[in-house]
Amino acid sequence: MGERSAGLGRRRTSTTLRMVRAWGCALLFTGGPVMGQAGDRAAPAPIIDELSGRWEGTGVLLGRPAVFEMSWRPLDDGFVRLSFTNAWVDEQGRRTPVLAAEAVYLFEGDGGVGVWLDDRPRQLTSRATVTDSSLVVHWRAEDEEGWTEYRIESDGTIAVTDTVLVDGEERTFGVATYRRSR
């Protein structure tokens, strides 16, 4: 997407993914919901299949015009990987990278758990709620809490809203509309 995402490279990304998988497994065994054995788990909701693939978005991040990229990829046994980047865009179209992240979620039926690592560097643990047309991921770190809603629109786009709690008040910090990449 920009300078930062191009500079991540395979080595950093694969190392990050190994760490995400390890932390995700630790989350499942220490604080995640009880889920059945791989063969016993209910299939994830259909929206997970609809999210699969590469998406590019435009919107507003922290009050500034921004571009976004996300890629959802199903893994084995109900796991799903999300790769994400965003960047501010100035009037001339120049991009300033803001955030790059990798997340791994484990979905079962209408719920899931996950872990997100980003280049701030932050680790967020999450619990997800799934419906036919939306995925809401409630995330938490030691000093940060909020949620991200991914909503499938009737035209096939995805509307994403990011909200954080600041002193007990909800504050939306990101809004974007994504279209599937070709």
Image: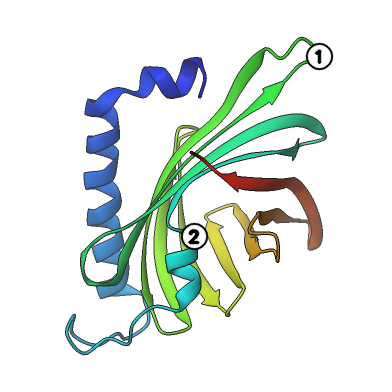
Based on the displayed image, in which of its 4 quarters is residue 52 positioned?
bottom left
Crowding at mark 1 (Cα within 10 Å: few <14, some 14-19, many 20+): few
Between tags 2 and 1, which lies in front? Answer: 2
**Residue denoted by label 1:** 91
Q: Position of residue 102 (x, y in %)?
A: 40, 44
Q: Position of residue 25 (x, y in %)?
A: 24, 64
Which element carries disc 1, helix, strand or loop?
A: loop
Residue sitting at x 30%, y 23%: 9
Q: What is the number of the mark on residue 176?
A: none
Is 133 positioned to the left or the right of 53 in the image?
right
Is 3 positioned to the left or the right of 105 in the image?
right
Based on the displayed image, in which of its 4 quarters is residue 88 positioned?
top right
Is 36 positioned to the left or the right of 166 in the image?
left
**Residue denoted by label 2:** 51
Q: Nearer the viewer, residue 96 or 51?
A: 51
Q: Earlier in the sequence, mark 2 or mark 1?
A: 2
Q: Position of residue 56 (x, y in %)?
A: 58, 39
Is 167 positioned to the left or the right of 54 in the image?
right
Crowding at mark 2 (Cα within 10 Å: few <14, some 14-19, many 20+): many
Amino acid type, mark 1: Glu
Q: Nearer the viewer, residue 178 or 128?
A: 178
1 relative to 108, above or below: above
21 relative to 179, above or below: below
Amino acid type, mark 2: Leu
119 relative to 26, above or below: above
- For the rendered model, the colour scheme is rainbow
- Between the residue at mark 2 and the residue at mark 1, the CA separation in whole angstroms equals 30 Å
Residue sitting at x 26%, y 60%: 75
